[in-house]
Amino acid sequence: MSLLDVQGLGISFGGLRAVNNVSFSAKAGEIVSVIGPNGAGKTTLFNMISGVYLPGEGKVMLDGRDITAKRPDRLANLGLTRTFQNLQIFQEMTVLENVIAGFHLQERGALVADLLSLPASKKRAAEAKKGAEELLARVGLQKAAERQAGNLSYGALKRLEIARALAVSPRVLLLDEPAAGCNAVETEEIDRLIAELAQSGIAILLVEHDMKMVMRISNHIVVLDHGEKIAEGNPETVSRNKAVIAAYLGTEEEAADADG
Amino acid sequence: MSAHSKWIQIAIVAALVAVLPFFFPSGYYYRVGALIFVNALSVIGLVILIGYAGQISLGHAGFAGIGAYSTALAPEYLGLHPALSAVLGAVISAGVAALIGRPILKLKGYYLAVATLGFGILVSLVLTNERQLTGGPDGMAVPELGLRDLLRDMGWRLSGGEFWYGVSGIVLVIGVWIALNLAMSPTGRAMRALHGSEVAARTVGIDVARVKLQAFIISAVYASVAGSLLALQNGFITPDVAGFMHSIEMVSMAVLGGVGSILGAMLGAAILTLLPQVLTVFAEYEQLVLGAIMISVMIFLPRGLLPSIAAKLKGRDE
C-alpha cells in the first residue's frame, strides 16, 4: 500500500494553470522523483503537498488519511516535512541549534517550565541536543556544530537542512533540489544520504535537475510539463519516453517553427 | 548561548545593582537608578518580542499603562493591596495581549507596527478620557506599597529612593533571569527559529501563530510590571505612561543597545534614561543632540551598541 497518495492535484494563479490534475503515489522506502523543464510546476506541486499552498482541487492522502491543505506544522506532526530549493536556514543560530530546533515537536512543553528553567524543560532540551548531535554526525557536520549556520558553505547548508528535516522523524520527506549548487563530491554525499534514508523506510519525494543523480537513485519518476503529468515510470521507461524527450529538447516541429 | 554565559550575565546585572550605590554622590541618583531599572525591565520584554521572535510593537506603552493604572485603580475601587494590584495588572495585560495578539500578529512588518501603534493610542485615549475613573490628563495618586513601613518597623530605615532602587533592582534581576531562561529553552528556540525563517519553522512543526503570541504576551507582562513599578515609586501616574512617545522610547532603547541582547538592551535603557539628564546642559538643543547621537549609533553600529562593540572586540567570526 502506498504511504503518500497524490490524487488529481491542481492549482491556478490568476489565469495561469500552474499544475493540472497530477496524481502519483509513493511507498515507504521508495524514492520518487518529480522532473520537468523549468516552470513545469514541480515546486508548486511540492508546495501544495507540503501545505504551503492551498490546492485548487485534488487530494493528498498520507497513510490513508486525508491531509489536503493541512498547515505545514500539522503535517510535520503527522510525519511529512520538506527542505527548500532556496535554503531556509535559521542563519543566526549555530549549526547544532538549527537541528535542535528541528526537534521542536519532541522538546516543546509547558511555557512556565521554560521560563523558570525547570528540570523538565532542561531535560527536554538536553534530549533534543543529543538527538541533534547524532543527526549532525549522520550528515557529516559534527565538526561544524558550534559554528554559526550562516557561515557554512552552500553544500554544507543543504545537508544541514536535511538533518533538520530528519529531526522531525518524517515518514515522508520532500527534498526540493537538494544537490543544486553542490559540487560533484557534495552531490555524491547527498546522493548516498538519500539512498540511506530511503533504506531506513522513509518515502522520499525528490525534485532535482541533476539528471544523472535522478536516474541513478530513483525508483519511480514523474515527469511534469506545463503543469501536466506527461509520463511516469521507472528511470528506463521515462528516459525513452518520446513526450519526455520532446519536453526537454523540443520537437522537430517546434524547432522548425523557431527557425521559421 | 551556554548556561555558563547565562549566569555570567545575571551576575553582571546583580553586581551592578549592588555596587552602583557606592558611587552615588547624592540620594537623587537612587531615583535615577530605579528609573533605569524600570525602563530596562520593559525593554527586556521588547527584546523577547523583537530580538527573539522578530515581531515589532509600537504600542507596548499601552501595557505599561494597564500595569500603572491597575496599581492606582484596583486599590481604590476593589480595595486590593497595591502589590496584588500590580499582579492583577499583569494578568489583565496578558489577557489583553492574548486577545489582540491573535488577530494582529497575523500582520507582518510595518502593518504590525501600525496595528500595535493603534492599540497603544487606544489605551492612552481611554486613560485620558475616562476622567471620572482615571482623573484624565491630570492623572491620579497611587497608594503606598506599605513594605517600606514594614521594613522600618523591623529597624531598617530606607529612603524612598533607596527602597525603590532595591525593589526595582531585584525585579530587574528576576526579569533578566527569566528572559535568559527563555532564550535557551525550547520555546525560546522556537521564537528565534521563526525569526530566522517562518516557513522553515513551520516545517519542523512550530505553531508559528502560537509562539508569536507567547512572545507578545510575555513582553506585555514585562511592560505591565514595569508600568506598575513606575506608578508605585512615583506615587502618581498620568496617561503619559501609556503614550505614543513612551512606546517609541522603549523601542529606541531596545534598538540602540542591541535588540538581540539582554545586556545590550539594558545598556540602551541606561543611556536613553541618563542622556536627557546629562544633555540638559545643551538646554534647548537637548533633543537635537539626543537625535544626533541616536542617528550616529544606528549608522555606525547598526546592530546596536553592545552587539556591535562585542563583534569588533572579538574580530570577524571565522
Image (cartoon, coloured by chain):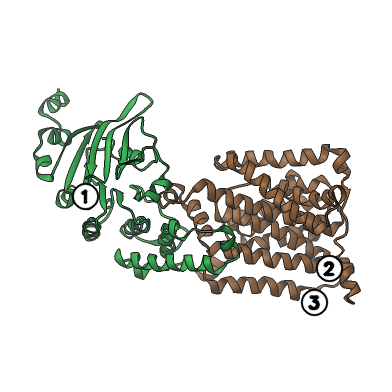
Chain colours: A green, B brown
Do tags 2 and 3 sit on the same chain? yes
Specify the amino acid type for callout 2: Phe
Query: Observer-nearest residue: A242 or B150?
Result: B150
Mark 3, residues whose alpha carbon is within 10 Å: few (<14), some, or many (≥20)? Answer: few
Q: Chain of mark 3?
A: B
* Position of B118 relative to B3 (above/below): above
User: Along the polypeptide, which appears first: circle 2 or circle 3?
Assistant: 3
| Residue A114 shows in the view | yes
Which mark is drawn over residue A31?
1
Q: Chain of mark 2?
A: B
Left or right: B285 as drawn, with respect to B186: right
Mark 1, residues whose alpha carbon is within 10 Å: few (<14), some, or many (≥20)? Answer: many
Q: Report x, y in % for residue A108.
A: 49, 58
Specify the amino acid type for callout 3: Phe
CA gap between label 2 and label 3 equals: 15 Å
Q: Report x, y in % for residue B302.
A: 57, 56
Q: Chain of mark 1?
A: A
Which mark is drawn over residue B22?
3
Specify the amino acid type for callout 1: Ile
Residue A35, quarter of picture: top left
Q: Which residue is mark 2?
A: B163
Element on which disc 3 rests = helix
Element on which disc 1 rests = strand
Residue at x 59%, y 65% (from the top left corner): B180
Residue at x 32%, y 58% (from the top left corner): A159
Residue at x 74%, y 46% (from the top left corner): B245
CA gap between label 1 and label 3 equals: 70 Å
Q: Report x, y in % for residue B271.
A: 71, 61
Task: For marks 1 and 2, give the one nearer the viewer.
Answer: 1
Left or right: A116 as drawn, with respect to A195: right
Left or right: B179 as drawn, with respect to B281: left
Mark 2, residues whose alpha carbon is within 10 Å: few (<14), some, or many (≥20)? Answer: some
